[in-house]
Image: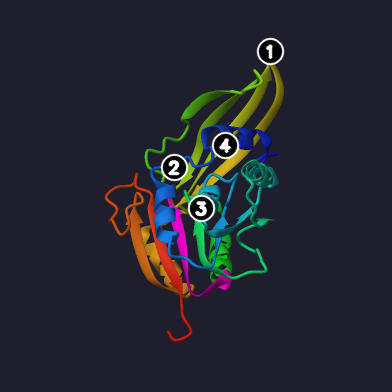
Amino acid sequence: MFSYYSSLCTEVYDLTKPVGYSLAGDIEYYQDRLKTCQGRILEAGVGSGRLIIPLLEAGLTVDGIDYSPEMLDSCRARFEERGLSANLYEGQLQDFSLPFTYDAIIIPTGSFCLIEKREDSLNALRSFYKHLVPGGRLIIDLVFPHGWKTGEITTSTFSLPNGEGITMEKKSVEIDWINQCTVSYLKYEKWRQGKLIQSELQRLPMRWYGMEEMKFILENNGFTDITCSADYVYQSQPTNGSDIITFEAVRKRASD
């Protein structure tokens, strides 16, 4: 019944989040945190390339993985436009297996929260750990359901260069306080001369984690040297539920 980051969603994403568009300073933050990284980096949930391309252009070696083939096709097209190349893999974060290990794995902008089932989230962390070199870093952004209002509907309209347009309706469907998950529906419709020519319906779950909860989960999965930052200011302590929280953790070294 539902699509998952399919073609219309990708078109809107490309319009609203172009390459190099920094969300609250995340690109600058990741460039700074990764600037000393000499080895290979993996962006999990790479999307259509908004963040990986600036990292590649800064001289870093970055691979990407995403579940959406449409997003990956858009990312490859953006690479080609800029004369860039990188390994892009299609797969689910909870059970991927890649031929490389990484000095750093990053999951920016709350993408980790899109993993709906808790066990899948834990499996994703285990996959990240497995793909890090000893001493390698995991950097992961989390978001909270700040300002959530069940039943709230918002609409947006996007004009395309060819004269067509896309409307997007987002409806906040439910919040589950016990299982720490929200669900929204996103309806995309493409129009040409007043006629509907394409539509998609996407179910968007978002799972949230308490700060102490995430620290415990990371420690329980073997990570050490855990730090927490708010709104892309390194080690700045969170002050309210609207903050974007970034955890950084290290895979144990052989000597630990």
List x then y, in percent, for residue 5.
63, 41
- Residue indicated by mark 2: 22
Q: Position of residue 15 (x, y in %)?
A: 56, 32
Q: Residues within 10 Å of mark 4 (few under 14, many from 20)?
A: some
- Nearest to N terminus: mark 4 or mark 3: 4
Q: Which one is nearer the viewer's eye here, 82 or 45?
A: 82
Residue 169, quarter of the rendered image: top right
Classified by dominant secondary structure, the portion drawn in magenta counts as strand
Mark 1 or 4 closer to N-term? 4
Residue holding disc 1:
193
Q: What label sits on residue 55 in the rendered view?
A: 3
> Can you say whether 139 is above or below 149 in the image?
below
Distance CA(mark 4)–CA(mark 3) = 19 Å
Secondary structure type for disc 3? helix
Classify 10 Å Cα crowding around label 1: few (below 14), some (14-19), many (20 and above): few
Q: Residue drawn at (35%, 49%), measured in percent from left and top?
A: 231
- Which amino acid does the dot numbered 3 rest on? Leu
The magenta segment is 130-142
For badge 2, the amino acid type reads: Ser
State yes or no: discs 3 and 2 in contact (Cβ < 8 Å): no
Q: Residues within 10 Å of mark 3 (few under 14, many from 20)?
A: many
The quadrant of the picture occupied by the N terminus is top right
Magenta-drawn stretch contains 133: yes
In this picture, residue 78 sits left or right of residue 141: right
Q: Please state which of the two labelled residues, at mark 3 or mark 1, is closer to the viewer.
A: 3
Front: mark 4 or 3: 3
* Image quarter in which the C terminus is found: bottom left
What's the residue at 65%, 53% (across, down)?
Answer: 85
Q: Is residue 19 visible?
A: yes
In x, y percent, where is residue 95?
65, 64
